[in-house]
Image: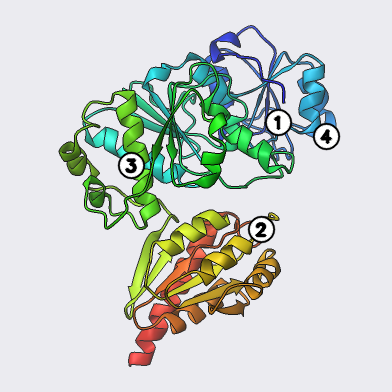
Amino acid sequence: MPTPPALRWADLPGRRVGVWGLGVEGHAAVRRLESLGVEPTLVDDHPPAGGLGGRPVLAIGDGGLEALAACEVVVKTPGISRYRPEVAALEREGVAVVGGLAMWLEEAPRERVLCVTGTKGKSTTSAVAGHLVERLGHRVLVAGNIGRPPYDPEAPDDVDWWVVEVSSYQAADVTSSPPVVAVTSLHPDHLTWHRGDAETYYADKLRLCSRPGADLTVANGDDPLLRAHADLLGPRVEWVTAPGGPVDDWTAGLGLLGVHNHRNALIARAGLVALGVPGAEDDAALARAAEGFEHLDSRLQPVATVDGVLFVDDGLSTNVLPTLAALAAFPGRRVALIVGGQDRGIDYGPLAEGVAGRDAPTLVAVTDSEAGPRIRAALAGGAGGAEVVACPDLEAATRRAFAWARPDGVVLLSPAAPSFDRYRDYRDRARAFRAAVEAVRAGTGRQRR
């Protein structure tokens, strides 16, 4: 893939600029351009009815591509694959196709920026890093994939440090790296965006580690795929591994579930130390700072305990890797795992192996969904002694899981698939899960009466 040109937002005034894609980042790009006095051409794959703020938005297939070809620079939203033929067509016409985050990194004070990437774990790591910086007494903006784009004029810029979560989509566009990058994990994901090829995904995901300016990558040392791709991790690597025994250090105050999340916290701390954040090297100061951390939604988030059964929402585990990590968060405990969702063609064999390798009773409730048949097939071929049941929907799966998990087990929604086959997004699925838990609670109350 050709390297995009190294442009800054400050380079755009006076140029013909288009914005392609009007999601969260697209809207932020429009605001940034307007603040620079640039009136962009607006294009979207599916234009909103009525345009944007009274301005027309062209469809990419109905005059939009031609309009973008008349621009000098096109700011592409991350969700639009850099490998789409329309991108190649624009570049052949001499149009610079760039990402908003990439342009921000070109002009940001990168020595005060921690970028966090990885297939899974990057949101928790970013949130922990931001929480620690703030509680250590510094001004911080947690931005990027986890929050507001850092280049949005509505985002604060009077801060001391930036923690930026970077997706593979965003990383593929970057032209410069900050000196310190944290990488939490590596596993095949989003392959359709990355030409359907895992190695292309790995190269794009890790591109942030080796662009000009890169120095140190703080990486998950327990991840064999990351170890195997160490050549993509830049000039220097600091490997961080999970605690070997019970956690009894400064991370305990974060209240995180799972050894992998404690490792994520250690990765966050190592990144802050490498940046030179005052206080990050002090265990006692970090232990005080850790207090009050708020769990991120749908990431091993405890929902309720009903009749001794703990319900946990891990709905953002949309791949096998984080689902296995979620299972590992409850060693020796009965777990009823709820899986299923949109089918992205990933291999569910490792899920079956992980379920079979558990040292405690396991039920897998597979919801009727796009990925359901392939998940059931994989589990039928090698889930060991685990019980596998098919359920028509999430509510039925929650009821079945609760009945099996009583009196002291865990009902874990960790679907190993995205939500989009039945739900608007993960938040919609989380609401459905919470409603199902409340229905279980109400039913239990009626049984008691």
Residue 261, x across and y down, in percent:
38, 50
52 w.r.t. 12: above or below: below
Q: Position of residue 189 (x, y in %)?
A: 62, 47
- For the residues marked 1 and 2, what is the alpha-carbon distance in whole angstroms? 25 Å
Q: Who is closer to the viewer here, 440 or 111?
A: 111
User: Dot 2: what SS?
Assistant: loop
Q: Are the two marked residues, 4 and 3, in contact with CB atoms closer than 8 angstroms?
A: no
Q: Earlier in the sequence, mark 1 or mark 4?
A: 4
Local packing at callout 1 (Cα closer than 10 Å; few below 14, some 14-19, many 20+) is many
Three-letter amino acid code at disc 4?
Gly
In this figure, which residue is indicated by the disc labeled 4? 61
Q: Amino acid at mark 2?
A: Asp
- Residue nearer the viewer, 440 or 48: 440
- Give the residue furthest to the top: 14
**Image height check: is 297 above or below 308?**
above
Q: Is residue 190 above or below residue 236?
A: below
Mark 2 sits on what residue? 347
What is the crowding at mark 3: few (fewer than 14 residues within 10 Å), some, or many (at least 20)?
many
Q: Quickly name the residue at label 1.
A: 82
Marks counted in the figure total 4
Amino acid type, mark 3: Leu
> Mark 4 or mark 2, which is nearer the start of the sequence?
4
Residue 280 visible to the viewer: yes
